[in-house]
């Protein structure tokens, strides 16, 4: 799972904007945002660079936090 939607929302950016920057179709970006499809690792790094975030911020951790 990824957090692309949350980061786009937080930055006030649209999926179409990301699609244009990444050179991918809106439908592909929408599939990433809706977690119907996960981007390749290389694409994830490109998205992180475009959004100026650490690639880790795009991912949902698979580890539970201990309290």
Image (cartoon, rainbow, N blue to C red):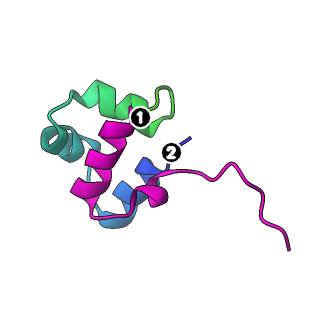
- Pinpoint residue 61: horizontal percent, then vertical percent: 63, 53
Residue 29 lies, with reference to residue 59, above or below; the image says above
Q: Quadrant of the N terminus?
A: top right
User: Residue 26 vs residue 9: left or right?
Assistant: left
Neighbor class of circle 2 (other Cα within 10 Å; few <14, some 14-19, many 20+) is many
Quarter of the picture containing the C terminus is: bottom right
Q: Residue at x 27, y 58 (%)?
A: 51
**6 to 67, vertically: above or below:** above
Q: Position of residue 7 (x, y in %)?
A: 40, 59
- SS at circle 1: helix
What mark, if any, has residue 2 been given in the picture?
Answer: 2
| Res. 20 mark | none
| Outermost residue, right side | 67
The residue pinned by badge 1 equals 32
Verify CB contact (< 8 Å) between mark 1 and mark 2: yes
Question: How many numbered callouts?
Answer: 2
The span shown in magenta is 40-67
Whether residue 55 sits left or right of residue 48 in the image: it is right
């Amino acid at each position: 799972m990824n957090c692309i939607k949350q980061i786009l929302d937080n930055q006030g950016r649209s999926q179409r904007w990301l699609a244009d920057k990444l050179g991918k179709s809106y439908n592909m970006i929408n599939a990433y945002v809706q977690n119907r499809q996960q981007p390749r690792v290389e694409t994830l790094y490109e998205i992180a660079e475009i959004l100026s975030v650490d690639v880790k911020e795009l991912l949902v951790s698979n580890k539970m936090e201990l309290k």
